């Protein structure tokens, strides 16, 4: 595998020396949900690195052949054994330093049922004043929760887009 | 290169037989703009396949290390030699059958200046009644323009999300 500019391109790519196949490496999408039940938010404590032991919203890499909302719902089942009704795209974050794009959907937790998926140590419903702000896994989680509690005051949830780069500011 | 389920995973991946590296292939993001100048829309006639000769909005694959809005602005320069002021994310489309996610930004064409980029045969500003509806390159272009002309009546442009699968309906 070499790193060179293919003919007709203007960027270096990973090219297989034997077969010539170009392996394009593009930004990856992480899809997740903000599951709500009776005003409480479902968070998952991560069982895996990075940020093992910290709290997150259910989210993970979108796979080929699915939509971003299907990916978000699938991750919610995998990490929290929770079925949700999606209520629309809510936050979109660019993290260019790690070439990731996050897409979170607001979601209603069906019948308030959830469990602990394989990638979670624990899952729990939190009231706003119970949110473990200092133990959140990622800035995307922090920002999505902040937006949500702010927007909930007016019950109006436009799509929120942000670019997040380190050092992350807490606001 | 083999196609098999790596340890700890639940899906088949492309794995290198000699070094063991896993090549994850995930959905790709296509970022673009809807450039507007004095109410007219800038379209580009494609010089390359697929859909050579058909009209498109400037858009292309997002690259590692950039944000989706940077990718959208870069593609607008590359395809239409046009500088734009971005006005926010506008349409998000999932095309799961080809594992693509489109993100279009509304944009203001600065000073009405544009040219013809390498991947375009022609570029042109169109009034609403001049749009070549039957010669648009992709359903994502059709839908973005339809949303725009509808939303323009109220001058209110919420983010529009849709899943598009063939056969595409024209509406």
Image (spheres, coloured by chain):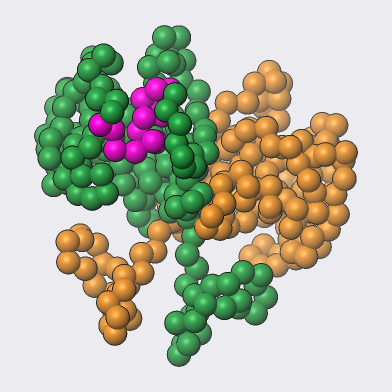
Chain colours: A green, B orange
The quadrant in which the N terminus of chain A is found is bottom left
Q: Position of residue B80 (x, y in %)?
A: 79, 53
Main secondary-structure element of the magenta-colored stretch: helix
Q: Is residue A102 visible?
A: yes
| B123, A93: nearer the viewer | A93
The residue range painted magenta reads: A135-147
- List the single residue furthest toward the bottom: A18
The quadrant in which the C terminus of chain A is found is top left
Q: Position of residue A51 (x, y in %)?
A: 25, 44
Q: Residue at x 32, y 29 (%)?
A: A34
Q: Is residue B161 left or right of residue A88?
A: right
Q: Residue at x 40, y 59 (%)?
A: B26
Q: Position of residue B14 (x, y in %)?
A: 32, 72
Q: Position of residue B46 (x, y in %)?
A: 73, 61
Q: Is residue B161 left or right of residue A52?
A: right
- List the single residue furthest toward the top: A153
Q: Residue at x 31, y 70 (%)?
A: B22
Q: Is residue A81 left or right of residue A65?
A: left
Q: Is residue B162 visible?
A: no
Q: Is residue A137 magenta?
A: yes
Q: Is residue B34 magenta?
A: no
Q: Residue at x 39, y 64 (%)?
A: B25
- Whether residue A69 is situated above or below residue B30 in the rendered picture: above
């Amino acid at each position: 595998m070499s790193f060179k500019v293919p003919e007709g391109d203007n960027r270096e790519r990973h090219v297989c020396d034997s077969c010539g196949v170009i392996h394009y490496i593009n930004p990856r999408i992480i899809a997740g949900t903000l599951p709500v039940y009776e005003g409480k938010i479902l968070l998952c404590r991560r069982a895996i690195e990075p940020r093992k032991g910290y709290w997150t919203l259910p989210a993970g890499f979108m796979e080929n052949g699915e939509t971003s909302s299907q990916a978000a719902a699938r991750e919610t089942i995998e990490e929290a054994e929770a079925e949700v009704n999606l209520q629309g795209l809510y936050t979109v974050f660019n993290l260019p330093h790690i070439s990731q794009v996050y897409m979170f959907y607001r979601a209603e937790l069906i019948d308030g049922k959830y469990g602990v998926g394989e990638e979670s140590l624990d899952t729990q419903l939190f009231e706003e004043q119970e949110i473990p702000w200092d133990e959140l896994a990622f800035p995307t989680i922090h920002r999505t929760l902040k937006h949500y509690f702010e927007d909930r005051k007016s019950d109006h949830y436009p799509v929120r887009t942000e670019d997040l780069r380190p050092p992350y500011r807490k606001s």
